[in-house]
Image (cartoon, rainbow, N blue to C red):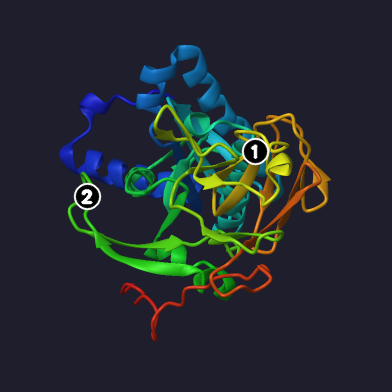
Amino acid sequence: MTMDLEALSLVEIIRLQGQLTETLKRRFERTLALVFTDVVGSTAYFARHGDAAGRALQQRHLDLLASVLPAQQGRVVDTAGDGAFTVFPTVEGAAGALVRLLELIAQHNTGYDPEHKMAIRAGLHWGKVLTDGALVSGDAVNLCARVAGTGEGAELRCTRDAFHELSKEWRLRCRQLGAVALKGMPDPVHLVSLVWQVKRKLPTHVRIRETGERFPLPDKDVISFGRLREQNGVVANDVVLSLPDRNLTQQLSRWHFELHRAGDGFSVRAVSNQPITVDGQSLARGAELPIRAGSLIHLSGIMELVFQSEDDDDGGLGVETLAIPHGGIPRPPR
């Protein structure tokens, strides 16, 4: 039946407007966990490496994201540029999927050179939206997108509404960021950062067992190890490897291996054809393996390196939890 809107009086139109609003909310309003993820620094990456490499980086993000959605009943609503908008029935499920995504990215990054490693930031919000099962719209969507945009690389930020839907286990792994001004939002929004990493005891020193020498690891993304001290007056390796027997030292490569920072830890990359094993596993040239405090590296069968933390413990794993102060984050009035 066609309605002649032009024939309706003001009162009739206002009544009709109210009826439509009520019907719209009854049929299509839902409360969902909303998530935005995007690749950090993608514009600069496109400019530096070209369109093909940039598009491949975006696809890595989308493929890894797609792999974590089914287990938590998540679905992609939209993708644009280097970002994705997804929804989940629960905040707990959304948090689990995002943590798994960040873990997968950290694992995959070990196979890439530093300039090709990917970092994403994510925003999580729990709010009311209008949805027909495909499209999702509303102010909550815009808010979530702004939250994601405030994050740093490999960071998961949540609104206060999302925080209150998390289990105690997840809440204890959140740290307060305070009220943050978001573009287009009239008032600052209280955010928290969910610490998703299982923290490793990171090595801070390396000890050569044959000589007892102990070297601090420099604060660099790539740390080089080899017997060459300098080349053309320039330092060749961050850690110079040598033995009392010069003939044995010559069996080490000039550049033997590198340590790469990978997510919340280190990985070892072999840059020589000389034999190298990491915690008992052989490492071929160009390949990588993760290490932690307590890891052992054997070089050419003549040198053993022990990686140690500041307190010389065994480098066991331990979850770092950051507690919310007493009373937590106050829940807003209803």
Q: Nearer the viewer, mark 2 or mark 1?
A: 1
Residue at 55 percent of width and 45 percent of height: 240
* Residue at 30 percent of width and 41 percent of height: 16
Front residue (pair 24, 275): 275
Number of marks present in the image shown: 2
Q: Earlier in the sequence, mark 2 or mark 1?
A: 2
Quadrant assignment for the N terminus: top left
Q: Which residue is denoted by mark 1 in the rendering?
A: 269
Residue 210, numbered circle:
none
Q: Look at the image and tell me whether residue 271 can be seen.
A: yes
Q: Is residue 326 left or right of residue 7?
A: right
Q: In the picture, residue 14 is in which quadrant?
A: top left
Q: Is residue 210 above or below residue 275?
A: below
Residue 11: quarter of image: top left
Q: Amino acid at mark 1?
A: Arg
- Callout 2: SS: loop
- Can you give x and y, in whole percent of width and height, for residue 49 in the image? 44, 17
Residue 23: give x, y in percent of width and height.
43, 46
Q: Is residue 61 above or below residue 203?
A: above
In the image, is 260 to the left or to the right of 124? right
Q: Residue at x 50, y 55 (%)?
A: 217
Q: Residue 83 lies in what quarter of the image?
A: top left
Q: Amino acid at mark 2?
A: Met
Report whether 238 appears left or right of 276.
left
**Which disc, if any, is residue 185?**
2
